[in-house]
Image (cartoon, helix red, strand yellow):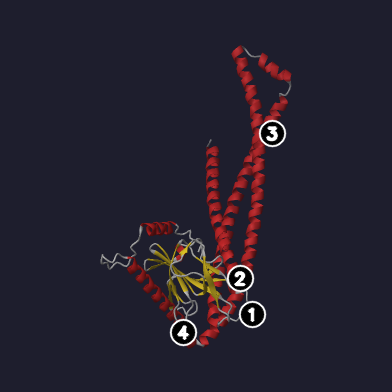
Amino acid sequence: MFRYIYWVLFLFISINLQSQNIKKQKELENKSRLLKKEIKKINELLFSNEKKKKNALEEVEDLELKLSFREELIKINNQQANEILKRISINEKTILNQRNQLDKLKKNYSKMIKNSYQSRSLNNRLMFLFSSDNFYQAYKRLEYLKQYSASRRKFADEIKIKTKLLQELNQSLINQKTKKDNLIKENRNAKQILLKEKKRQKEVIDFLLKKRKNLSVQINLKQKQSKEIDNEIEILIKEAIIASKNKKIKSNSVEFDLTPEAKLIASNFRSNKGRLPWPLEKGVVIQKFGKQPHPVVRTTMIQSNGVTIATKPNSFVRSVFDGEVMAILVYKGSNPSVLIKHGNYITAYKNLGRVDVKKGDIIKSKQKIGKVFTNQKSGKSTMQFSIFNNTIPQNPKNWIYEM
């Protein structure tokens, strides 16, 4: 009885551990898949055109992005390999236990067959029944013979089931070991590529550090231009807020006064948080939202009210939701930006090479509003995308699907 309870507990714990391990393994496989997808996009969108010469600052920023994804992939692969090792260990213990159980079943079955062989003749069984003292004893002996026969069939069935389970566990073990070996091989290759990319990055950084003053000027200039455009966008949003208010009622609020239709659009926009489509069919985020250290000069902090996305040349920019074109901003020294109003939410699409809409146009989700700008010298195509709730910048990562 104690052995039976021990076996049931062992089986329950093994199944529970296997279930947790499989769940963790699937999560890691999904992360690995997404990271590989991002690395592929980065290579396609940022490193495919070797003929076009990037400036050193852009190259090191792009390399830093790729390195961060590559390092994360290696880390995830290591975690996957560790989870597989745990699973192999659990399977090996389960297999050992199953083998012991199978051996016991076979021994018991062997004894039963031996006993059955010794009393196999029909005459012996009939004599066993007819030698009963009374009808009740005969009935009991008949029931015993039936149970004995059923036990034999049960033992035979259990042996078949255990044997099949053992075969499946052995095959699973072989598959897991193959998977682990493949992951180790993949990681070895990824580390070799990582070392080459780090070497190239170091060369570019060393070159940049010799021109530290020029580097700081470039970073500050980019930040200044970005800040000026953000200020202009804030002014345009505030002007739209003022225009939305009832002129008879004085209000200092920096929030839109919405019509019932606009409230519905805003509500629908908000309910789609995390599920909005990308503003480009294909792209990779090369600069995140918020305050962050510069990828080269770590002591320099940069601020971004949105995200910067790299894509293919001549890619169309599209609206992420239904709305109305609030403004077309053309600021000195920069490329056009389009602002689309969705109730009290605003989406901004900056650094466009071509604009195909005008102020007041009613826009549908995924409708093309223009084309991305492509730098002819570097061949790099990027756009900046922002979301505002009234005048407050939102992190697009929380709104756009799988950003």
Please determine whether, in this image, residue 287 is positioned above or below residue 173.
below
Disc 4 marks which amino acid?
Answer: Ser
Disc 1 from disc 3: Cα separation? 77 Å
Q: Is residue 316 left or right of residue 178?
A: left
Q: For marks 2 and 3, give the one nearer the viewer.
A: 2
Q: For marks 2 and 4, give the one nearer the viewer.
A: 2
Q: Position of residue 207 (x, y in %)?
A: 55, 85
Q: Is residue 123 left or right of residue 2?
A: right
Q: Earlier in the sequence, mark 1 or mark 3?
A: 1
Residue at the spot of label 3: 110
Residue at the spot of label 1: 51
Q: Classify mark 3: helix, strand or loop.
A: helix
Q: Residues within 10 Å of mark 4 (few under 14, many from 20)?
A: some
Disc 1 from disc 2: Cα separation? 14 Å
Disc 2 from disc 3: Cα separation? 66 Å
Disc 4 from disc 3: Cα separation? 85 Å
Q: Residues within 10 Å of mark 1 (few under 14, many from 20)?
A: few
Residue at the spot of label 2: 44
